[in-house]
Image (cartoon, rainbow, N blue to C red):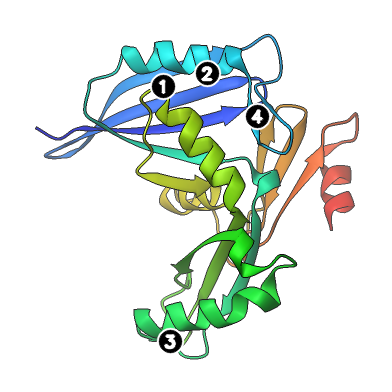
Amino acid sequence: MHIWQVGLDIQEDGFRALAVQPRRYGWQLRHWHYQPVSSPAIGDNALRLSSEILEALSEWRRNLPRRVSIRIALPAEVILQQSIKLPEPSLPPQEQEWLVESSVSKLFPLAARELAVDYRLLSPINSDRSVGGEIVVSATRRSVIEYWESELAGIDIFPDIIDTAPCVLRYMAQLGGVPTNSLLIHQLYGKHLLVSPLEHPFYYQVIPDNPMTVSERIGQAS
């Protein structure tokens, strides 16, 4: 039997979780949960998860099957992301890795030894195979990854994948058939996450929530 595929999103105001299970003709929704908290769940540059959120997560985990595949997204604020244009359309995976490794020190202001780095290839939206797409390189401090893994392991949560909110939003937009020229906006607790349209180079920005209109917020982020 296929195990549940669980997505877990932890924000300052609580957490949301969704579980699906693959079936012969698609996916079956097996679980949906939202748990608010009374005090900020995340603090100190993501190096603190409150006792309240950890207790809520622990109780939630006990209600899931023993064997699940969990994916989490780190807060956008602790992720550094840059994109690299591929020099040719069909660069082999090994050469993609070499390209990323040689570029890390130029892309980010921190020493490579301080960073946990991952990357993924974003294929071009159009069907022109002469266009190589881009590699999105994500980095965060190793201390952040180690802290989250340690705290979550203490409550029996072992993520198979640690992703980033901007990339998740782009995947959802592409799979959902959102027009490729659409600016992606995701409302978070007290702020908004803006992600570039699918037909444009990868870029995102977090802007605070305030009485401005959506158009004014977009102008502020430009």
Q: Is residue 3 left or right of residue 40?
A: left
**Mark 1 touches mark 3? (CB < 8 Å):** no
Q: Which residue was labeled with disc 4?
A: 48
Real-space CA distance between mark 4 and mark 3, rounded to the nearest whole angstrom? 42 Å
How many residues crowd around disc 3 within 10 Å: few (fewer than 14), some, or many (20 or more)? Answer: some
Q: With respect to residue 44, does 139 lie above or below?
A: below
Mark 3 falls on what kind of element?
Answer: loop
Q: Please report contact status of discs 1 and 2: CB closer than 8 Å, yes or no.
A: yes
Q: Mark 4 and mark 2 in contact (Cβ < 8 Å)? A: no
Callout in the foreground (4, 3)? 4
- Label 3 near label 4: C-beta < 8 Å? no
Q: Which amino acid does label 2 sit on?
A: Leu
List the residue tagged with mark 3: 89
- Residue receiving disc 1: 155
Q: Split into 4 quadrants, where in the image is the C terminus? A: bottom right
Percent of width and height locating residue 215: 84, 45
Instruction: Report the residue at 65% width, 45% height from top.
Output: 76
